[in-house]
Amino acid sequence: QLQLQESGPGLLKPSETLSLTCAISDDSIRSTYYHWGWIRQTPGKGLEWIGSVSYSGGTSYNPSLTSRATMFVDTSKSQFSLKLTSVTAADTSVYYCARQHPYYYGSGSPYWYFDLWGRGTLVTVSS
Amino acid sequence: EIVMTQSPVTLSVSPGERATLSCRASQRIGINLAWYQQRPGQSPRLLIHGASTRATGIPARFSGSGSGTEFTLTISSLQSEDFAVYYCHQYNDWPPYTFGQGTKLEIK
């Protein structure tokens, strides 16, 4: 079965840039069928969607993070990535990457739900 | 932003009994709702999408219902591995996609 694996630094200082990568175990990232997303989880705020990216590089971000978040796809390496600038302690979370699966009602635009998640990686922001 | 509210926060049920979890959306979302199970130390696992469609490999004791703003996840006969935290997620209106705060299902 497809697996997703997050990687990146576990510890950052305030104001630094967080860079995370999600490696995909097969070449499905080259398919136009799926989108790919990042979600983070904290005990206080629960699950928070950060953003999503398509095969073609189209992106959508949470309005609360759009000024700091950037996502991109590298199909040659079967991975996609997240950069989050100017981190603070509030960005301390477990970060998950996930696959988005489309559902079509007739011929309209699809609706996208998260059907497969990585194991997550803890990122701590502390001076 | 659509706010998802789950109730109760904690539900205590005995093994073998039925558990009913609720999720309410602040706006109508059709049936664009998913449920996830998260066991301690693990990532969320998709149980239900389209409000009532079980994901691949999910046992039949899990069922979802509802539309519009009110949704329910029912686990018909609780097994030991079912005690976990459950989240609902709306994907009808974005950005942003939003999640409920979770219901912890614990052993009574």
Image (cartoon, coloured by chain):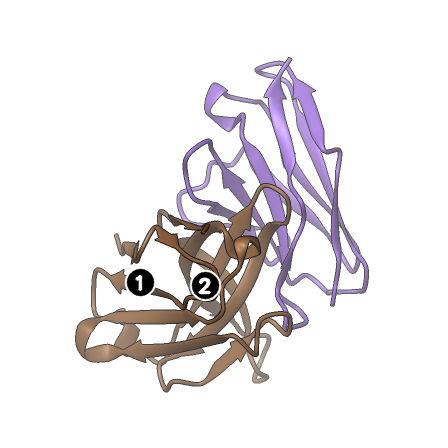
Instruction: Check disc 2 and give the amino acid type.
Output: Trp
Left or right for A125, reference B35: left
Instruction: Check disc 1 and give the amino acid type.
Output: Cys
Mark 1 near mark 2, Cβ–Cβ under 8 Å? yes
Q: Which residue is mark 1?
A: A22
Residue A104, above or below B13: below
Secondary structure beneath dot 2 equals strand
Chain letter for mark 2, please: A
Residue visible at 25% across and 62% down? A23
Q: Which residue is mark 2?
A: A38
Mark 1–mark 2 Cα distance, whole angstroms, equals 9 Å
State the hue of chain A.
brown
Residue B97: which numbered mark, if any? none
Q: Find residue A112 and report its horizontal and vertical position in percent.
A: 53, 69
Residue visible at 49% across and 59% down? A39
Q: Find residue A119 and report its horizontal and vertical position in percent.
A: 35, 47
Figure quadrant of residue B69: bottom right
Residue visible at 46% across and 71% down? A85
Chain letter for mark 1, please: A
State the hue of chain B.
purple
Residue with the most extreme front position:
A127
First in residue order: circle 1 vs circle 2: 1
Q: Residues within 10 Å of mark 2 (few under 14, many from 20)?
A: many
The answer to which of A59 and B106 lies nearer the viewer is A59
Left or right for B56, reference B90: left
